[in-house]
Image (cartoon, helix red, strand yellow):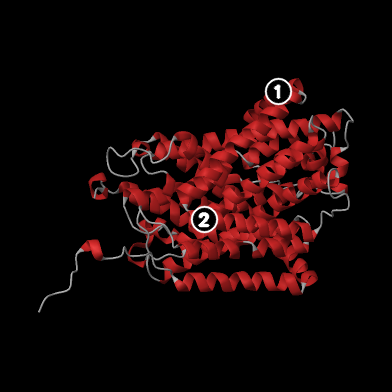
Amino acid sequence: MEQPDQSPDTRKPEQPKIDWFILIAGTAILLALVLPAAFAPAWTSHKIDLAYEFITKKFGIYYIIAAITITVFLLAIAFSRHGGRKLGPAGVRPVYSSFAWGSMLFCTGIGASLIYWGAAEWAMYYDSPPFGVAARSDQAIIWGATYGMFHWGPLAWALYCLPTIAFCCSYHIREMPILRLSAACSGVLGKYTGRWPGRIIDLLFIVGLLGTAATGLAFGTELVSSTFTRFSRSTLLPDLDDGFGMQLSIMILATLLIAYSVYRGLDKGIKILSVINATLVLVLIGFVLIVGPTKFILEMGVLSLGHLAQNFIRMMTWTDPLARAEFVESWTIFYWAWWLALGPFVGMFVAKISRGRTLREVIFGMMAWGSLGCALFFIVLGNYALDLELSSAYPVVEKIFAESPSWTIAAILEMLPMGKFWLLFVAVVALIFTATTYDSATYTLAAGATKSLRTDQHPIRMHRVYWAITLGLLPSALLFLGGLDPLRTASVLASFPLLFVYVILIFSIIAMLREPEADASP
């Protein structure tokens, strides 16, 4: 009997398979967080406050220790012989240009939250400064201009970089066809990588990303809503309200844009949006620097960079065990928790786009260029706002606390030459910023809930779209609750289990780098 044709040419390529346990369990946990916020907001807000206070006061010191340890560990790798390890076969070239790679890395790592905090964070520290400094004093101004760059600086990017290096080792050096957090821990887990210990780690990654992405999405949505509302009031719709309805509409629009981008894929969607956004952001920063108080911006920028360099060790080791003024709990621990919980997502994505580079390039690309990019926002946008406050041109601090940071940012943007144009410009940039960050998050959620994924494969399109829609639920609930505390708490709660996973990642990296390089060859 004639055998049917079984040649490879007639077979459809095998599609990546969804891990239904991870998908269903992650969705169930998400709904367990969203539904109480929707139907019992007062009870939920109270429980959120209790949870935040418990974790930051009982376990906050471990976040401080983790940030310091991880930074030292990564620098040791970068300066060791392992720093030259190539991600992929010998001779392979980087898939993306340096600008495209840096744009995707940067936009994935920060999002519209950087515009939000870059312009407004100094005011929080000016009003409640660290180290017992008198509020609203000259020293408070200097600390206010400095601390934002610390919280978005090398230690923060180190928390992103550790999982990135672990993924690089497992995905490119070991060539494991699995882009999941459990695979990054395979140097420790061994045969348990694909069993329940590994699957629990993958579930923690999904939950951590959903919780922390909600914080950044909410900040970005508030900024888009405020800038667009202020633009509309001064042009077309004078009665438009910057409330929950507007913010929910922006959230839906951002979710649709994210869904479209991830449907288009890594090269046609995420790469293009990232490059466009990086270019637009540079235009904004350049314009504010040129037409704003250039001399003051540069003077405060140099002063704050020098102040950061002089006090870096003091800042990274400050735990405030005597005064207990809660600055550390409210800000440093919140930020380390936020970066830590987002780390596996950023790491998974950056590892995916870093084929052809070395471990040293990845470490310095993230810790150095990422930190400098963030510092640029704080120096230009923050000091522009600070100048308005000190010159009495606009009561920035008063408006931030009386109204909201996002509405105040919209007001100071409107004071620029062609202010209405820049309101609309920033609304668009913040929307794209939100999309570029969280379409990457959606991609990694889908990858984390996929059983195996070769370097030439991507998660199924509709799987990516599902997570894009799901990702918008929790930030909508947090915006409904209102205030900064629910957003902070979402990050801290999501990050806490991942503290233990980061310990596993360190030992996993050590184990994988100790393997002979020949073993990593195909």
Is residue 270 or residue 373 the one in the foreground? 270
Q: Which mark is residue 391?
A: none
Q: Which mark is residue 262?
A: 2
Disc 2 is placed on an element classified as helix
Above-or-below relation of 427 to 17: above
Q: Residue 235's x, y, as percent? A: 84, 43
Give the quarter of the image for residue 120. Answer: top right
Q: Residue at x 58, y 44 (%)?
A: 156
Above-or-below relation of 79 to 303: below
Q: Residue at x 46, y 47 (%)?
A: 267
Check contact, mark 2 vs mark 1: CB within 8 A: no
Disc 1 is placed on an element classified as helix
Whether residue 307 is visible to the viewer of this picture, yes or no, is: yes
Q: Amino acid at mark 2?
A: Val
* For residue 64, side relative to residue 233 (left or right): left
* For residue 289, side relative to residue 337 (left or right): right
Q: Amino acid at mark 1?
A: Leu
Disc nearest the viewer among 2 and 1 = 2
**Count of residue discs:** 2
What residue is disc 1 on? 298
* For residue 403, side relative to residue 430 (left or right): right
Dot 2 or dot 1, earlier in sequence? 2
Q: Residue 83's x, y, as percent? A: 38, 37
Mark 2 crowd level (few <14, some 14–19, many ≥20, 10 Å Cα) = many
